[in-house]
Image (cartoon, rainbow, N blue to C red):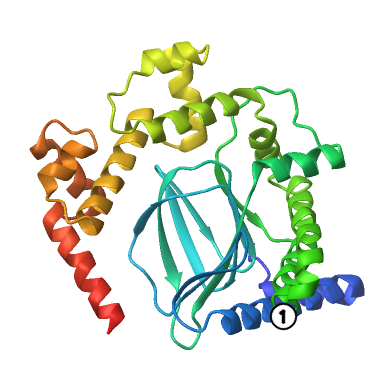
Amino acid sequence: MNAAKPSEMFDRDFTHDPQAKREADRAQANRDELIECIAQAIGQDGTIEPLKGLHFNRFSSPSECLHSVSIPAFCVIAQGSKEVLLGGDRYQYDPMHYLLATVELPIASQILEASPAQPFLSLRFDLDPTLVGSVMVEAGHFSSRSRATVKAIDVSPLDANLLDAVVRLVRLLDSPAEAHVLAPLIKREIIYRLLIGAQGDRLRQIAVLGGYTHHIARAIDRLRKEFNQPLRIETIARELGMSVSGFHHHFKSVTAMSPLQFQKQLRLQEARRLMLGENLDATTAAYRVGYDDASHFNREYKRLFGAPPIRDVERLREAAVEQGT
């Protein structure tokens, strides 16, 4: 059986449901306004923070796969599309979807659609756990007593009410006096709408520190701080009151990678930063991040970044020079 084209489905729905058409028109008007507001706020490629905790991004061409560490945030694309890789999982989103990340994790991301005429435009709203907890308590949306783990990143459809709140927050950029009073209220509304939406459990479990997700969040924080130290899984599992096999299982459920893979990505990303930003040679950077064997470091570096350390850093520097000219 052939599926109806999206336009045919919308036409048919709107014929019988005028309210659905009004909602769709309102959502499209909000998407158009979001594009206009972000494009006006950031005229060149890069990132800015027009309000505390609110970041705008603009890119005029698709990007290669970029490695970074995610932070707890709510991410919306106004124009274009993007893919995020977490371990072996892929998450693609666009103006019709949002991405929610609730734990600091090593990720890779790639802008898929962007051009000078229609640049990639997006925003990131940083999630303050204290604020999330405050909204959750005020709304009475406590976490369930389930001890299930919740993956730290996912993508969901961006509904009209959540989009409307985002646009109203961005609109405040033109009214600093109003922003001082209204921005905190709209931020709370955005968090509330996330809590009652498709990813509410994800946000609640991180905010309340419930279930096994809390234990994994503690382990992640420890691994991030001690990434250059030997990995002692048994010690970490025992301190969390978990078996080694249980710790492995729940860690991978949240992060989509094993503790060893997680540590490896953190080490290699830091080594790349040291070589690029502090001019360290590959051997020194390798020892700095915890590798005892330089050849082992070179093999793993090439496997993650696609080129040996020196060649990769040279390529990054050349790309930076080209962008600056």
Q: In the rendering, at what x and y percent does residue 223 appear?
A: 40, 31
The front one of 133 and 193 is: 133
Q: In the rendering, at what x and y percent does residue 48 appear?
A: 52, 70
Which residue is the site of mark 1? 174
Q: Residue at x 59, y 80 (%)?
A: 41
Residue 51 position by quadrant: bottom right
**Where is the N terminus found, in terms of image quarters?**
bottom right
Residue farthest along the bottom direction in this orientation: 117
> In the rendered image, is residue 8 in sight?
no
Residue 151 position by quadrant: top right
Residue 199 position by quadrant: top right
The front one of 19 and 240 is: 240
In the figure, is residue 36 to the left or right of 278?
Answer: right
Q: In the rendering, at what x and y percent does residue 163 appear?
A: 73, 66
Secondary element at image label 1: helix
Q: Residues within 10 Å of mark 1 (few under 14, many from 20)?
A: few
> What amino acid type is highlighted by mark number 1?
Asp
